[in-house]
Image (cartoon, rainbow, N blue to C red):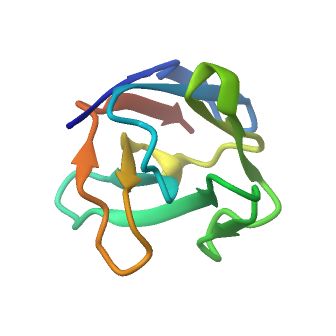
Amino acid sequence: QVQLVESGGGLVQTGSSLRLSCAASGRTDSTYSMGWFRQAPGKEREFVARVIWSNGITGYADSVKGRFTISRDKGKNTVYLQMNSLKFEDTAIYYCAVQSRADRNFEFWGQGTQVTVSS
């Protein structure tokens, strides 16, 4: 089992920045990748970004490319999401997740952190 705790959400204005953190504990030795997802009110959860734990290769949703940056600190078992130029439509609950193997879906999820962007 892997436990995930997100932090860093809040209420900001359009154009502002926030950095989310997600600390992993438990059986983290078999992590293949960590990712960020979000769910806005009335919408389905969607992929935001991911980082492959071993080599740092990243991937992003088109909607956040160029504005969001995912990074990891292997020593702290922590993944970050730097969010710049925030837009109203970025408002959502943000969840981090762990994928233990490349052939599996993301299996472990945090409780989420609210990001609200006021226009």
Question: Residue extending furthest bottom?
Answer: 103
Q: Is residue 109 above or below residue 62?
A: above
| Quarter location, residue 61 | bottom right
**Between 79 and 64, which is closer to the camera in this rendering?**
79
Which is nearer the eye, 54 or 43? 54
Residue 67 on image: x %, y %: 77, 54
* Above or below 92: residue 20: above
Left or right of residue 34, residue 3 in this image: left
* Residue 33 place in picture, x, y as percent: 52, 57
The residue sitting at 55% across, 25% down in the picture is: 21
Residue 12 on image: x %, y %: 58, 23
- Residue 55 at what x, y percent from top left? 76, 59
- What residue occupies the far front of the structure in this picture? 29
Identify the residue shown where x is 67% and y is 43%: 86
Q: Quadrant of residue 84?
A: top right
| Residue at the outermost right position | 66
**Quadrant holding the N terminus:** top left
Residue drawn at point x = 25 percent, y = 47 percent:
108
Give the quarter of the image for residue 106: bottom left
Left or right for 84, reference 60: right
67 is higher (above) or lower (below) than 95? below
Measuring 56% from the left and 28% from the top, which residue is drawn there? 77
Q: Quadrant of the C terminus?
A: top right
